[in-house]
Amino acid sequence: MAPKGKAEHSAPAGISPSRAAGASGHEGNGSVERLLDVSKVFAIVKKNWMVLKSDKVRLTMLAIFPIIMIVIFGYTAGEAPKHVAAAIVDYDQSFYSQQVMSALYSSNLFSIGHVLGSQDEGKAMIDRGEIKILFIIPPGFGADIESGHTATLSIIVDESDPTVAATTRASTNAFVQQISNSIAAVNLQRISAQAGLANSYLSSASRTLSGAYSKSGASELDMIGYAYTDASHVASQTASTMSSTIRTLKNNMGEPIDQNAIADSFNYASSPGAALYLLASGDSQAAALQQIGMYQAIQGSNARLAKDNAQMYGAAMSLASKSGQDKAAMASAAGLVGSASGAVAQIQSATASIPPTLISVENIEPYGTGRAGIDFLIPNILALIIFQGAVMGLGRAVAGERQDGSLTRVFLTPTSNVTIITGTLLFYMLLETVRSSAIVFVAMLLFGVAVKGSLLAVLVMITIYSAGCTGLGMILSVLSKSQEQYQSIAMLFSLPVMFLSGVFLPIETMPAALKGVAQVLPVTYMSDAMRGIIIKSFGLDMLIPDIVFLSIFALATIGISLLLFKRELI
Amino acid sequence: MTDKTEYAIECSGLVKKFGSFTAVNSLDLRVKKGELFGFLGPNGAGKTTTIKMLTTLLTPTAGCAKVAGYDLAEESAFVRAKIGVVPQEFALFEELSPAENLWYIGELFGMKKDYLKKRTEELLRTVNLYEKKDVRSEGFSGGMKQRLSVAAGLMHTPDILFMDEPTTGLDPQSRIALRELTQRLNASGMTVIYTTHDMEEADKLCERIAVMDKGRVIALGTGQELKRTHGGYQRMTLSLSRHDESLARELSKLVGAKEHLYRDGRIDLFLSGDPSEAVRAVIPFLSKKKIDIHDMNVREPTLEEVFINLTKKDVRD
């Protein structure tokens, strides 16, 4: 072999192969591969940051995107629609149907343009897009209320726009609850008046009788006295309980029901803490319970009043049968007792006509008037943005570096897979955590979102969740040969999650199967946990199920990405 | 370290299959230490696959190899410590400066801070990028990027440097600069494995050349050996004042050419014998016919012709 003339000049500095260089390393060149090399992990994080930092466009986009997102959602998605075009068909034409109609007219949720003669006319208007909702007061509506049955107000909602339909339905539910509250209050007031009346009759009867028979010392008088005292006590107690209930009902009518509290009762399965909280402080449910209790109390007092009344009547009759008594006083007292008896009977019929559950909490959907606040949406937006950021953003991480060959160089260094994946994950996790914290900050600043719980808890949840989402992105990145391939696979995850996150479409309007899927998505667990912290000031101890689930998600995705990460290039 | 063997690379029966496609078919090869060894072949011949196997980036389907004295399969970490790679792609970060890129590679080699800094400076001077050490590499020319890539490959002071088509897509000046750099590295004692599909480059640069096609080494030797063995005939080209097909036939007969070609007013004669004898015969023949010679030359076969002879196809097919 005739080697080409070796250059005469000496080797340039630094390029002569060091015969000393071995796998054991030489001055500073420690080529030992550790399973997890912390200083290399930090080098990978720093490299990624340096690359990102010098790509001003990408950096700006990453920073601006969540802000744009939160601003758009803040101004659009939060508000429940108001002045929804509506029409009424009144088949009942009763006192109660008039009440409902006047309430609908005065509500700012609906804009009643037409009172129609038939349901078909209303449907035609929906078809033409002139109204979004049709209220139908069926025949017998008023009679049902009078006779103590739950009256039904029918609605037909334009389903062509599911978002509007869902919010409108929910607004209607909330609104109908207000109407029934006001009817209940009127009923209670009537009962209260009757009780007062019965009481005053009994009091007059007692006075008349005791005046007439004060000297006789008949045992019947004692009996009448006892019965009266008891009746009077019961009546006053009932009156005071009733007035406090009426006050509560009126309070509830004055402001919208706390829909967030009710909303949480729907997914308490995923967040038992939320359910506990609700039982302790959910105003509307408590009010409903109180009301039910109230009716039971009225029924009980009523029975006692009736018994007292009968005793008084019996005693009066017994007195009357005795000879030589004051006939005029006797007749007067008997009349009064009779009137009291009538009043008690009135109470009896009034309480009998009140359905035990006038307010049906189950029927109210979470997207009512109370949804208005961005507070409700911010947990979902946050959960969604982190997911999207991580799942759409890791194309560059492994797939991109595989594509441009820079991963090849890393493979040629003594750097373990665990170190590569850990460093890359850590960088993207930090990136998402910073971005999400920025979202919370912007929401607080621009929309006055108050984080009632601790910011530390928010940060902990964001970190765990980011790890999981980044892990998922990493799986996709590890599986993809190029960034283009990554994008198309990532889309497969990103789009469905976007629609199942509850940010764009209410989960409640989805078919049961999709709803089921939405319930087990990490994005849902994160939304629940964030809602707990931001709105209900949950501590981390209340979020243990969410933390456990999301931690499993993170460990699983990171583990799988490690298993799938192959050093071979093709 | 004592030399375990005189060979930088020894492989036998190396095979790489992708599904049913055989990219490299039973490769047997020995490269001596300090050699500048070339793999020559068209795109898809299996050069890059061979390099990837020898640099531990791909696992061979069959066969075995020793690189820098270490077994490719059993001691891949030791192999990696001894080899540097300049991949076909830039494979560094355009967003980063040369110094930052080398810092990253150095960190992954676990270099200590001071040494890393010193080594970076040294190498950037070697590849003539010291002036640009803090400039983002995005705007670099192909040649500058390739030189940075070489520096990255040298970061851990390897014994063997693999360069996969490093001059592809470069302008002539950059090619020359990179070839010079390659020669300097080789002169300093480094074994260089160089792949190219440029025949001229392989001929000029490499001591020995393995011609590859369809996953096989179809010829191996120095440029001279290859041309002598597989190049075929010397070619005499004549440009004359008068010319036609019958004159070409007469001349061919006169010099005893194996073949002749009459094209674009030029006559090509493929000589089997001594070219100087042919020259001595042609000149009096033409002057007797009063035909002027505008141009006349005899040249050796090129590697391109070697390749065509070996594969019966044009190299850029």
Image (spheres, coloured by chain):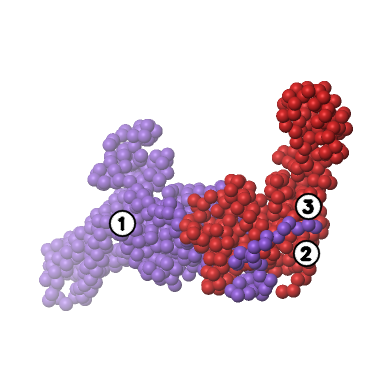
Chain colours: A purple, B red
Q: Quadrant of the N terminus of chain A?
A: bottom right
The residue identified by callout 3 is B222
Q: Which of A485 and B116 is in front in this view?
A: B116
Tell me the residue that label 2 is attached to.
B7
Identify the residue position indicated by label 1 in the image.
Answer: A447
Q: Which of A20 and A161 is in front in this view?
A: A20
Q: Residues within 10 Å of mark 1 (few under 14, many from 20)?
A: some
Q: In which quarter of the image is residue A436?
A: bottom left
> Could one spot residue A188 in this view of the protein?
no
What amino acid is at disc 2?
Tyr
**Marks 2 and 3 share the same chain:** yes
Disc 2 + disc 1, Cβ < 8 Å: no
Give the chain of mark 2: B
Q: Are marks 2 and 1 on the same chain?
A: no
Which circle, 2 or 3, is nearer the viewer? 3
For the point 59% across and 50% down, the residue is B174
